[in-house]
Image (cartoon, helix red, strand yellow):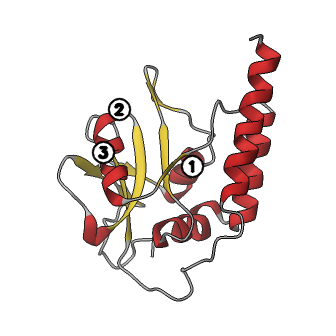
Amino acid sequence: MNATSKRVVTFLGVILWASMALHSPSTAQTTRGADVAVVVNSETPVTDLSLSEVRKVLLGERQYWNSKLPVVLLIRAPAARERDVVLRVIYQMSEAQFKQYWVAKIFRAEAASPPRIVYSNDMQYELLTALPGSIAFVDSRNIRPGVKVLRVDGHMPGEKDYPLR
C-alpha cells in the first residue's frame, strides 16, 4: 500500500470515527459531578499545566512531552460527563465541532490519528498505566493509584479555583 492509499484509509477511518457518535446526547447540562481531574501515566515528566497548555495538548498542537515521549490522547466516549466537561471547558467546541476538527487535522496530515476513545473507567486506567505519555480526564472521585494527577493553573481537583468543573 503506497503513502496516498494509507492516507485515504486513515482519512476514511477518521470519518467513520467522527460519525459514530455525532448525535449522542449530552449529559453535561443534566448531571453535576465532581471536578474532572487531568491524569497522566506516572512516567510522564509533567506535574502542572496551565489550562492553555492543556488545551494545546488536546488540540494536538503539543505532540511530545519531551524529545522521546509522544503525547497519547485518551478521551471518554460521547455521553460521558468527563467528555462533556473537556469539550466545553478545554476544547470550547460542540461534539460536532470536535469531530470536524479532528477529521480536518488528519486530512491536513497535522496529526497521525485522533484521540483514542475509551468506553469505561477500567479501559481508561488500563491504557493510562500501559501507555507512556498518555493523558486522560477522570471524575476526581474515581482516581486510582498508578497515575499522576496534574495541577491545572496551580490547583488540584477539589480546590476552590480548579478550572475543570
Q: Earlier in the sequence, mark 3 or mark 2?
A: 3
Residue 126, image x, y percentages: 30, 45
- Few, some or many residues within 10 Å of mark 2 (<14, 14–19, 20+): some
The residue pinned by badge 2 equals 132
The residue closer to the viewer here, 134 or 119, is: 119
Going by the numbered disc 1, the residue's amino acid type is Leu
Rendered image quadrant of residue 165: bottom left
Residue at (76, 45) in percent of width and height:
15
On screen, residue 103 versus residue 56, left or right, reads: right
Dots 3, 2 in contact, CB < 8 A = no
Q: Between 160 and 64, which is closer to the camera in this rendering?
A: 64
Front in this rendered view, residue 41 or 16: 16
Location of mark 3 (residue):
126
Residue 86: image quadrant is: bottom right
2 and 1 marks in contact (CB < 8 Å): no
Dot 2 or dot 1, earlier in sequence: 1
Residue lying furthest bottom: 30
In the displayed orientation, state which residue is furthest to the left: 145
* Residue at image location 30% in from the left, 65% down from the top: 156
Which numbered dot is residue 93?
none
Residue at the (70%, 68%) spot, across then down = 94
Residue 48 pos. (x, y %): 36, 50
Q: x, y (%) of residue 87?
A: 60, 65
Amino acid at dot 3: Glu
* Amino acid type at mark 2: Pro
Helix, strand or loop for disc 1 = helix
Which residue bears the numbered disc 1? 58
CA separation, marks 2 and 1? 16 Å
Q: How many marks?
A: 3
Q: Is residue 105 above or below residue 48?
A: above
Q: CA distance from mark 1 to mark 3?
A: 20 Å
* Quadrant position of residue 132: top left
